[in-house]
Image (tube, rainbow, N blue to C red):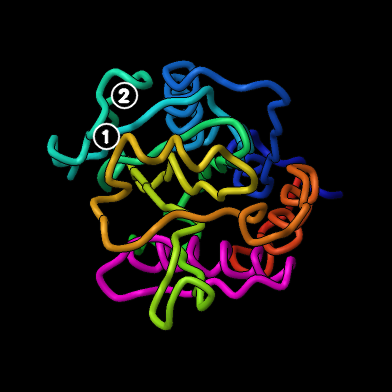
Amino acid sequence: MVKPLTMTEEAAETLEWRISDTPVPYDEAVAEMEKRAAAIADGTAPELVWLLEHPPLYTAGTSADARDLIDPTRFPVFRTGRGGQYTYHGPGQRVAYVMLNLKRRKPDVRTYVEDLERWLIATLAEFNVTGELREGRVGVWVRRPEKGMTAEDKIAAIGVRIRKWVTFHGVSLNVDPDLDHFTGIVPCGISQHGVTSLADLGLTATMADVDLALKRTFAGVFGGGTS
């Protein structure tokens, strides 16, 4: 006779994917993440990858420098507990909030961040875009030789928080946002390079296309089932 799983065992063996079809206010998303992360830590809810968009806004991570907020009245600014500096979120940008239990995976923060980077790079490869990492620059970058021999633009950002070995916050990938919205901040404190998107690179990928690519490449990096 097969012993039925307890809630804790069942939660540990599943991974839920959630897609929000309308922009989610930032404070509501943070409250939901806090609640879900606590439930995951308690073993009463499965891990979750939440794909969404936000209304136009800026967030300030724990390392944010006030001088990098160039236009403080342009969009709402949210102080947040994730690592990193200032970043922009808005329509046309796919945000993936990742809530995983590292205690049952690998309790190593550096490895987790590297896995997020690998996931983004694998997702970009689905669209024949070569994403690259740079020492001292967080996020994923693409070369822009048409702008100059050494020109590079940022296409994806990473900002994480971990509590009781459960992750939250996550990554953002620029699909087709208004790139002018990034000019109100110094994105991630880096002023020497620009920001790009799949659309800016000449690709017509939809948000649904990106979601499918994120789901296809996730298991190859993180493993785990889905529900």
Residue 227 in sight from this viewpoint: no
Q: Which mark is residue 198?
A: none
Q: Residues within 10 Å of mark 2 (few under 14, many from 20)?
A: some
Looking at the rendered structure, the kind of residue marked 1 is Ala
Residue 83 in sight from this viewpoint: yes
Frontmost residue, 72 versus 111: 72
Tags 1 and 2 in contact by the CB under 8 Å rule? yes
Specify the segment rendered in magenta. Answer: 110-139
Kindly identify which residue carries mark 2: 78
Please provide percent x and percent y for residue 26: 45, 22
User: What's the residue at 64%, 65% (across, down)?
Assistant: 124
Secondary structure type for disc 2: strand
User: What's the residue at 58%, 38% (across, down)?
Assistant: 8
> How far apart are labels 1 and 2 at the CA level?
6 Å
User: What's the residue at 69%, 46% (across, down)?
Assistant: 14
**Horizontal relation, residue 207 to residue 46: left or right:** right
Based on the picture, tell me whether residue 126 belongs to the magenta stretch: yes
Q: Earlier in the sequence, mark 1 or mark 2?
A: 1
Kindly identify which residue carries mark 1: 60
